[in-house]
Image (spheres, rainbow, N blue to C red):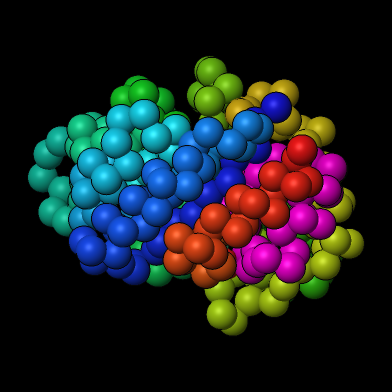
Amino acid sequence: MVHWIGTSWKMNGTQDFGENYAKKLREAKVGQVEGIQPFIIPPFTLTTTVAKALGRFSGVALGVQNAHWEDSGAWTGEISMLQAKDAGAQVVELGHSERREYFGETDETVNLKVKAALRNNLRPLVCFGEPLEVFEAGESIPFITAQVDAALDGVEDTSSILLAYEPIWAIGEKGREPNPEDLETAFAELSARYADRVEGILYGGSVNHDNNQWLLRIPGIDGLFIGRSAWTPEGYLENIRLAKEVIG
Ligand code: PGA
């Protein structure tokens, strides 16, 4: 079984940064580590730069952080799945909580985008997660499974889809690191419901070099989706090295 371990740079990085990061990954041959499928998701403006710097046979999957459900048209400020694919992407991240909170992403638009991604031969990486008050009320499971069910609704073949459970309370500078107990029940449930239907179920939210290994030992966690601790090539490569020790 392959473990997907990757990062989104969110709204960080200019051309030199993207080129240098990709070059370091290529030199480290990170795409040849057995048992790990690395992926990186730069901002749109760096897609072609990173694709070129990685080269065709890097083994690193390249993604974009969002794309529209229509292939073309009057949608100012958007890019389509077709354009993302054309720029070199293989993966499209969908439904991140920052997009849901600040840019009006809903379960319905995520579902439309999952279908558009598959139509364009892009692999959807569907993010979902509950806010703190839902977690504290002990209602995480119905909340997150409803999000996943909505994202997959009407999709016949879900086998290429990646799911990423990213509790909102654990994400970013304001987030708090999870404990194993916070995640074990959720991943048991997610795994029972979806593991045999999708490519993998990842965890994201304050992943760092200290928690990377115990996270990967939680049953049901198939990979990691990393923010801050992979925003330098060295930080990302250290995450891969630590993961490899666990995966063997
Ligand atoms: P973080 O971001 O690792 O910086 O908390 C995670 C994410 O938003 O996917």
Q: Residue at x 80, y 72 (%)?
A: 136
Looking at the picture, does residue 123 appear above or below residue 169?
A: above
Quadrant, the C terminus: top right
Query: Which portion, as a residue range, is magenta?
Result: 202-225
Quadrant, the N terminus: top right
Looking at the picture, does residue 3 appear above or below residue 185?
A: above
Q: Is 50 contained in the magenta span?
A: no
**Residue 4 relative to residue 80: left or right:** right
Foreground residue, 106 or 202? 202
Image location of residue 37, percent across then percent down: 55, 36
Foreground residue, 236 or 24? 24
Answer whether residue 132 is visible to the viewer in this image: no
Q: Residue at x 83, y 67 (%)?
A: 179
Image location of residue 205, percent across then percent down: 63, 64
Looking at the picture, does residue 62 appear above or below residue 18?
A: above
Q: Work out which residue is located at the far top of the displayed protein and give it.
A: 156
Q: Residue at x 58, y 46 (%)?
A: 5
Q: Residue at x 21, y 32 (%)?
A: 86
Q: Is 217 contained in the magenta span?
A: yes
**Residue 238 relative to residue 248: left or right:** left
Image location of residue 214, percent across then percent down: 81, 57
* Image-quadrant location for residue 192: top right
Image location of residue 18, percent across then percent down: 29, 58
* Image-quadrant location for residue 171: bottom right
Looking at the picture, does residue 152 appear above or below residue 121?
A: below
Report the image quarter containing ligand 1.
Answer: bottom right
